[in-house]
Amino acid sequence: MTEPPRPERFEQRDLTEAAFRDVDLSRARFEDVRFDGATIIDASATSAELRDIDCSRARLTDAKAQQVEIVDVDFTDARIEDCTFERASLRDVSFAGASLSDVSLAGAKLEDVDGRGLTLTDANLAGAELEDVDLSSVSLRGCTITGLTIDGVRIDELLARAVTPASEEG
């Protein structure tokens, strides 16, 4: 009986402006890697782990990163399209100025995230949990937010509070 291949490990690498197409990085471990300005198309990274990664200005298209753990990753000014981060765990992540289009974060947990100036278009946030997330100047267009919670409060409750006139509050 042969053993399954060991997951790839990428540590202390500079992959600035690199281009990846049609790659399977499932179960891979990335630590202290620069993907600044990189282009990644048609990639799979299911159950991968990313720590201390610079993905600023990166372009991700058609990537599947389900059940991935993302810690201390910088997606500042990144363009992410047609990607899946379902049931992912994201902590200490920056999406400042990033653009996410046709992205699924369904069931994902996001904690301590800088989302200032983030643009989300046609994103699926169903069942996602956001804790300590800065949503200043965020733009949401055509997004699914059913079951989304922000700091432990369901989005439907937050919206109901926002539209309740002060005179009706007890």
Image (tube, helix red, strand yellow):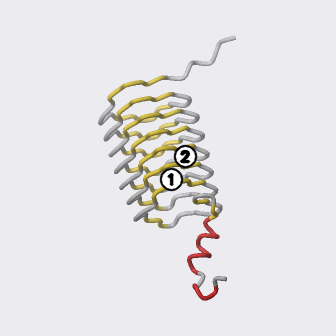
Residue ID at (54%, 23%):
7
Q: For the residue labelled by badge 2, is the local secondary structure a helix, a strand or a loop? A: loop
Circles 1 and 2, Cβ within 8 Å, touching? The answer is yes
The front one of 96 and 78 is 96
Residue 98 on image: x %, y % = 38, 53
Which amino acid type is shown beneath numbered disc 1?
Val
Residue ID at (63%, 69%):
156
Q: Residue furthest bottom?
A: 167
Neighbour class for label 1 at 10 Å: few (<14), some, many (≥20)? many
Residue ID at (56%, 76%):
162
Q: Please state if 20 lies on the left or on the right of 62 as rendered.
A: left
* Count of marks placed on residues: 2
Residue 106 on image: x %, y % = 60, 52
Q: For the residue labelled by badge 1, is the local secondary structure a helix, a strand or a loop? A: loop
Neighbour class for label 2 at 10 Å: few (<14), some, many (≥20)? many
Q: Please state if 92 lies on the left or on the right of 58 as rendered.
A: right
Above or below 157: residue 122: above
Q: Residue furthest right?
A: 1
Q: Residue furthest top?
A: 1
Above or below 43: residue 115: below
Q: Earlier in the sequence, mark 1 or mark 2?
A: 2
Which amino acid type is shown beneath numbered disc 2?
Phe
Q: Badge 1 is on which residue?
A: 103
Q: Quadrant of the C terminus?
A: bottom right
The front one of 167 and 28 is 167
Which numbered circle lies on residue 85?
2
The front one of 10 and 164 is 164
Residue ID at (54%, 47%):
84
Residue 79 on image: x %, y % = 38, 50
The front one of 32 and 21 is 32
